[in-house]
Image: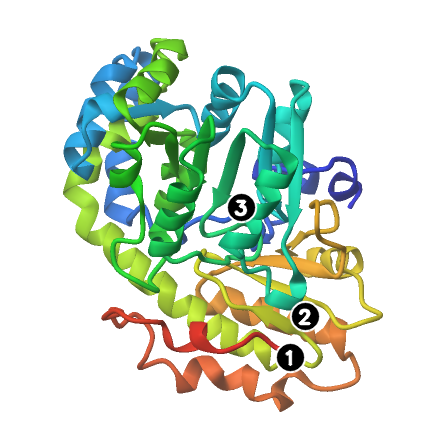
Amino acid sequence: MELLRAQAHSPSYFELVRAGGENPAPVDFCIPCNPYFPTRGMMEELGRNLEATLKFYPSDAKTITAELCSTLGLHPQTVAMGNGSTELITWLDHLLVTESLAIPIPTFGRWTDQPLETGKRVDMYRLAESRNFALDVDDYVRFIRQRGSRVAVVCNPNNPDGGYLPRHEVVRLMDLLADLDLVIIDESFGDFVDAEPYAGVAAEASIRSNVVVLRSLGKNFGLHGIRFGYLVANPALAGRVRDALPKWNLNAFAEVVVFMMRKYMAEYHDSLHRLADDRRLMFQQLSQLPGLSVFASQGNFLLVKLPTGHDGVQLRDHMFKQGVFVRECGNKLGMTSQFVRLVVRPQPDVTRLLTGFFTYLDPQRSFESLPTANLHHRHATHLHQPHLGGLPPLMSLPPSA
């Protein structure tokens, strides 16, 4: 329990395992990771290559980037690959942010922390809970003009609330801010979007003078430990970042996975459909818990607000004792400890989560008395059916008041 309170960010899986001794690792609802990918066959293939992967140097970043671009249909001159998105955020700050950066909050902490650490001014635009943390493009642009910010960032979908700005609105934002030094669209969770097809704006970034799109492979592919991500920008911007990166900044595991991707893309897309189904069902189940507010999300996580008088730190500790690890958001700028972020996971894990929530929120009642307890049985025929486009059914519902 002390480990949970000892640092601002969440402890790693390995820290939790070491601290737990002989106890089993908790079910992880904290770290946003795809539970359906890699496939078992892919993991077995990685295992067969383990000795060579560990013993030999990887190829240089140029070779790995070329293969990634071939698989994803990108031009290598518009792409720079990094050792995780955090490395790319660091280099963007050092190379392209000179004075000030505007960022909506709450959001991923490195977008505020990184420029502050290097002495930049960070103009924080607070997203309103009353608007379900939705970003108003026109109001954000007014804020940027009033503050004189030279760089603007948007995370889409946003972390921790999962709010999604439609593609046409992102393009309009880029048009309105064409005079800034830089506009960064962080699409680290973009592959989980199913509200519209072809949601990303990487193609737009590659032909604009001041736009960078950031993408994460670790989150989407369920491989955080490999630490790899990439950015897309016009050749001059991408080249500036690429030239600053070390020649061998990517490890051999990243190379092996990138060269396996083409073979497993069908399984990967299936994993996204399965996760979207789980997200809709988990949203519905959480919404039935007493007093809980659940925010619609296009990420692989859901933000919930506890009822008045309940605290996320107490909930986190309660859940951890029951073998479930959740992300309490009190240390996120623009949030309070009433908010908790929950990663979307398969139903057997969600049942444990719901039971823990219920025993915390209403310990006098039986969990089995709620319709929530049997939802996964009634919806079994819906799970894992491909989403055929349009707004997902539950995403169009307003979150609880």
Depth check, mark 3 against mark 1: the one in front is: 3
Query: Disc 1 and disc 2: Cα gap in Å?
Result: 8 Å
132 left or right of 237 in image: right
Nearer mark to the viewer, of 1 and 2: 1
Q: As rendered, which of 293 and 24 lies closer to the eye?
A: 293
Where is residue 304? Give x, y as percent: 63, 65
Which circle's residue, 3 or 1, is located before the other in the chain? 3
Q: Work out how far the residue at label 3 is from the one at label 1, CA to CA, in angstroms.
A: 38 Å
Relative vertical location of residue 113 with respect to residue 242 in this rendering, above or below: below
Q: Is residue 294 visible?
A: yes
Q: As displayed, is residue 102 above or below residue 62?
A: below
**Around disc 2, counting alpha carbons within 10 Å, would you say few (fewer than 14), some (14 to 19), or many (20 or more)?**
many
| Residue 141 tag number | 3
Q: Residue at the spot x=61%, y=27% of the render? A: 100
Q: Which mark is residue 381?
A: none
Could you tell me which secondary element the residue under label 1 belongs to?
Answer: loop
Residue 48 appearing in the image: no
Q: Are marks 1 and 2 in contact (CB under 8 Å)?
A: yes
Image spot of residue 45 (x, y percent): 23, 36
Count neighbours of disc 1 (C-alpha within 10 A) and say few if under 14, some if 14 to 19, many if 20 or more.
some
Q: Amino acid at mark 3?
A: Val
Which residue is depicted at the point 61% across and 32% down? 148
Seen at 48% across and 68% down, the residue is 348
Name the mark on residue 357. Answer: 2
Percent position of residue 28, x then y: 56, 52
Callout 2 secondary element? helix
Report x, y in % for residue 184.
Answer: 45, 35
Mark 2 or mark 3, which is nearer the start of the sequence?
3
